[in-house]
Image (spheres, rainbow, N blue to C red):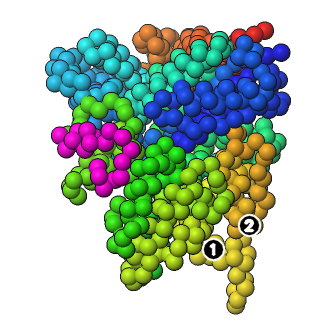
Amino acid sequence: MAYFLGVDTGGTYTDAVIVDEAASRVLGKAKSLTTRADLALGIGRAADAALAAAGVGADEIALVSLSTTLATNALVEGQGGRVALVFIGFDAGDLERGGLTEALKGDPVILLDGGHSHAGTEAAALDLTRLEAELAALGDQVMGFAVAARFATRNPAHELAARALIRRLTGRPVTCSHELSAQLNGPKRALTAVLNARLIGMIDRLVAACERHLATAGISAPLMVVRGDGALISAAMVRERPIETILSGPAASIVGARWLTGAKDALVSDIGGTTTDIALLKGGLPEIDPEGARVGGFRTMVEAVAMRTWGLGGDSEVHLQTAGLTGGLRLGPRRLMPVSLLAVEAGEMVHATLDRALSTETAGEYDGRFVVPMGGQSGGLTAREAAVLARITAPMPLAAALTSRIEVAALERLVARGLVMLSGVTPSDASHVLGRLDAWDGAAAHKALTLLARRRNGAGERFAPGPEVLAQAIVDQLTAQTVDCLLEAAFAEDPGFAGQDAAALARHPLMAAGLRGHRGVVAVQARLAVPVIGLGASAPSYYGAVGERLGCETILPEHAGVANAIGAVVGQVSQRATGLVSSPSEGRFVAHLAEGLVAFSSAEEALAAMEAALRAEAALRARAAGAEEVNLTVQRDLREAEVEGRKMFIEATVSVTASGRPRVAHG
């Protein structure tokens, strides 16, 4: 009998499960800390432990499938490598559209003449001489390139020519916008390409780490990766298009939730270390977001499940708010390494630093905060950023890494680049103090919360009388923010509130009164009308209180902590190819094929040629993505106008979807 291995690499934990070939039961499961310095270590420990728990040999594994939240987390936290955007046929004003300037975060932009018209004809010649000079000036300051040309979805020739030159001169990875989406809106395609280029190094390291362990363990099965729409894709293909793995982990959790519970209508809420991801199951299936995946404030053109993602998790940064007399708490969106976890790796340094801070009554600005080097490509740093990074050679107190306040901005930039990581108090530390969690160093968590509790609010009083009180306040804040997230998702999915501000409705005083069951001159009652399925290792610790607050059933399945890893191996391969047929003049119909524009005398001839090309392309992609037997479905979206009583063809979009189960190593 053959078996499947599912692996999910998250910000804090890497999970692994073994399921039978029929994908009907979990035979073994395991968790291990994600080892960011060498991801293969965490993957290996989890996979080996799951194999041992299932009593299955490495040679019996027929398929390995990987899901991950690393790409999602990076976008939520604003992290990723430094890239350059080659923007062809656009001007500086186009950078302000669609959040492109914000996404670039100061990374270089090369504006070039070129691009095409909406009909696919060349609007201006491509300036390759200028591109060559700009590449020479950049040197090794970037780790990859994104290329976006005007109307490249109608004719990709200029993107392809620019890519060929960049690869020849630099050897760096290049992302072309037309390969990620067939839609118009150049700046939005450019944003998607920038984010893809920024993630290439991270996802390549993850796939390489997984392949490295599989080879070491003697597992020869194909390696698949979960896309953001829940479908599977080959590891080779995902290396070129890592942007498709944003919402990979959440999509896998939806598949896993359906498999674990059989629920048809529910809100699925997956809490990890960095994010809370929420989607609606309706009739047993999630919706696909028609506008493209939205993550970390960016609306991409990536097809993914309609998932709403918040920077709220077990390792979210705890902010003390000093505005007003009493102040307050806020969690996220950035993930910190919990102090209790850092103390497992660097206990002597952590405890010595915390004890030193506790020995004085004066509260320091950086008490209980540390910084950890993460490695990675460091090209393009300023002199100040490079000086701060050179100082951080090992985990150390944050105060020791900074020589002046002016270096704080440089450190934040290093954090955004993923070169260093901050450590501080998180809900996970609070759970250690309250006895809900004992996985790491509870004594370090107790000391760190003691330091945080003695900070002063606007009235000059301590935030809390002791660590236990502060820990409970942090957990209560996590409950409150989770409730807000679930309500916001519910209002957004409820057709009765279409077009209204879901965030405002979720936080409206009347809603809060209704959840409390207010009875006064006015009686207000409100509750969530569908169950909440809580997923994630920490869901049992927090989601009981969430269900009570929302007045709904909370479902915590047996394998909730490894739902993503389960979802990774029960999906299908799916690839879609899309093309356009236009009519630039009466009686002339143009199929926008990959090899160029081809004209026909009838719409049906052009549509048939496009469909045939797309069938071949979709099937080829699906097999390259790992599908064994491919099923094809075709969809035509015709746009016509009625002129003087007869229909006139304007244009048509043809889509072909190829799907099938992945190949396995054993018959």
Residue 594 position in % (x across, y down): 46, 13
**Residue type, label 1:** Ala
Q: Which residue is mark 1?
A: 512
Element at badge 1? Answer: helix
| Relative horizontal placement of residue 475, taking residue 659 as reference (left or right) | left
Q: Is residue 388 magenta?
A: yes
The answer to whether residue 443 is visible is yes
The answer to whether residue 503 is visible is no
Residue 257 position in % (x across, y down): 74, 42
Q: Is residue 195 above or below residue 154?
A: below
Q: Which residue is mark 2?
A: 548
Q: Is residue 333 above or below residue 301?
A: below
Residue 115 position in % (x across, y down): 30, 24
Q: Which residues are magenta?
A: 383-401
| Relative horizontal placement of residue 581, taking residue 514 as reference (left or right) | left
Element at badge 2? Answer: helix
Marks 1 and 2, Cα distance to the nearest angstrom? 13 Å
| Relative horizontal placement of residue 530, taking residue 304 as reference (left or right) | right
Quadrant of image for the N terminus: top right
Nearer to us of marks 1 and 2 is 2
Residue 593 position in % (x across, y down): 47, 14
Q: Is residue 313 magenta?
A: no
Mark 2 Cα-neighbour bin, 10 Å: few <14, some 14–19, many ≥20: few
Q: Is residue 589 above or below residue 183?
A: above
- Dominant SS of magenta comes to helix
In this view, the residue in front, 164 or 331, is 331
The image quadrant that residue 190 belongs to is top left
Mark 1 Cα-neighbour bin, 10 Å: few <14, some 14–19, many ≥20: some
**Residue type, label 2:** Glu
